[in-house]
Amino acid sequence: MLAPEAAHWLRGQGLEQVQARSALGASASSQVSRYRFIQGTSVIWKEQPGMSFDFFQAEADGLAALRAATSLRVPRVYFVGEDGLLMEDLNPAPSSPRYWESLGRGLAELHQFRGPHFGFSGDNYCGLGPQINSPCADGHEFFATRRLLPQAQRATERGLLGGDLLRQIEQLCQRLPELIPPAPAVLVHGDLWSGNVIADEQGEPALIDPAAYWGWAESDLAMTCQFGGFAGRFYDAYQEASGMNGEWRSRAELLNLYHQLNHLNLFGTLYAETVNSTLARYR
C-alpha cells in the first residue's frame, strides 16, 4: 500500500487519481507495486515491512551512484520515506537483439569509475543482509573484514555454521592475497544476478536493486554466474570493452562465498551445502 507521505508527494506532482494498481510480486527483500494514474504516468512503489528509513535511503544512494557512473538505464528515485521507495517506472519490455552486448559494455563503463577506497559512503544492504562499507585501503582486507568474516560470524552465532567452518573461513581470509590478484576499487552493482537486470521500454538493459559499493570489478562478474549466469554475448562484450581476460572465472566461486554466506543467513540451511562445497575447494 502506498504510504501517505508518498501519496502526498505525488499529489504535489498533480498525480492523485489512480487508474490501476498492479502488484509486481514479492522477493526476499521487497514488495513492489506499479501505480498508474489517469494522466498515463506510472510509478513504482517498493516497500519492505519491518525495515526503517535507512534501508530505503541506502538503496536510493546506490541507485544515484549508478546513475552517475554508467549510461545503462537506472531508475530515478522520486521519494524516500520511512515505509518505502518511490521510483521511475521503466515499463519493462522484451529485450532488444543487442541487449546482452549493451549490458556488457555498460557494466565495463561502470567499472571504469574508480573509488577513493574500498567501501562506500555508508553501510547498506545486500537483499535484507546488512552490508558493512566502512572505508578500507586494501581490497583483500576489505573482502575479509567487511564481507566474509561478518557473514561467517553471524551465521555461527545463529547456529547455521559450525565453529570448524568459521575457522576455515578465517584461515581462508589470510590466504586471500595468494588467491585473488590486487585490483583497484571501482563502483560495483553489488548484487548483479539476473533478477536485478531488466529490459526497459526500449528493450535496453537497466540495473535495479543494487547493493552498491567500491569494490573489485570481478565481484560483479562472479555474481552474474549465480543462478544460471548471463548470455555468452554479455561476457564477450564486457571483455572487449574492459580488456579484462577470462581468468576471473577461476576465482568466481571464492568471490561468491560472500553471497553464499549472506543467503545462508537470510534463508537458512538451504544454502549450507553450497557454502560447504565452496570451502571444500580451499581446504
Image (spheres, rainbow, N blue to C red):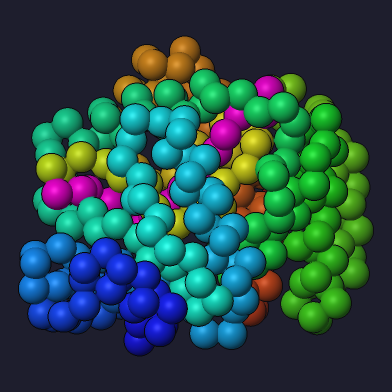
Question: How many numbered tags mark residues here?
Answer: 0
Q: Position of residue 261 (x, y in %)?
A: 68, 62
Residue at 11% across / 80% down in the picture? 19
Residue at 15% across / 44% down in the picture? 203
Q: Nearer the viewer, residue 40 or 211?
A: 40
| Magenta residue check for 21 | no
Is 10 left or right of 224, judged from the image as shown? left
Residue 231 seen: no
Could you tell me which quadrant the N terminus lies in?
bottom left
Residue stretch rendered in magenta on the structure: 184-201
Occupied quadrant, residue 109: top left
Is 11 left or right of 224, judged from the image as shown? left
Q: Position of residue 212 (x, y in %)?
A: 57, 46
In the picture shown, does residue 79 fall above or below 113? below
Is 218 left or right of 236, judged from the image as shown? right
Q: Position of residue 156 (x, y in %)?
A: 83, 73
Residue at 89% across / 52% down in the picture? 170
Occupied quadrant, residue 82: bottom right
Residue 111 seen: yes
Q: Position of residue 148 (x, y in %)?
A: 76, 53
Residue at 67% across / 53% down in the picture? 258
Occupied quadrant, residue 116: top right
| Magenta residue check for 198 | yes
In the picture shown, does residue 6 fall above or below 219? below
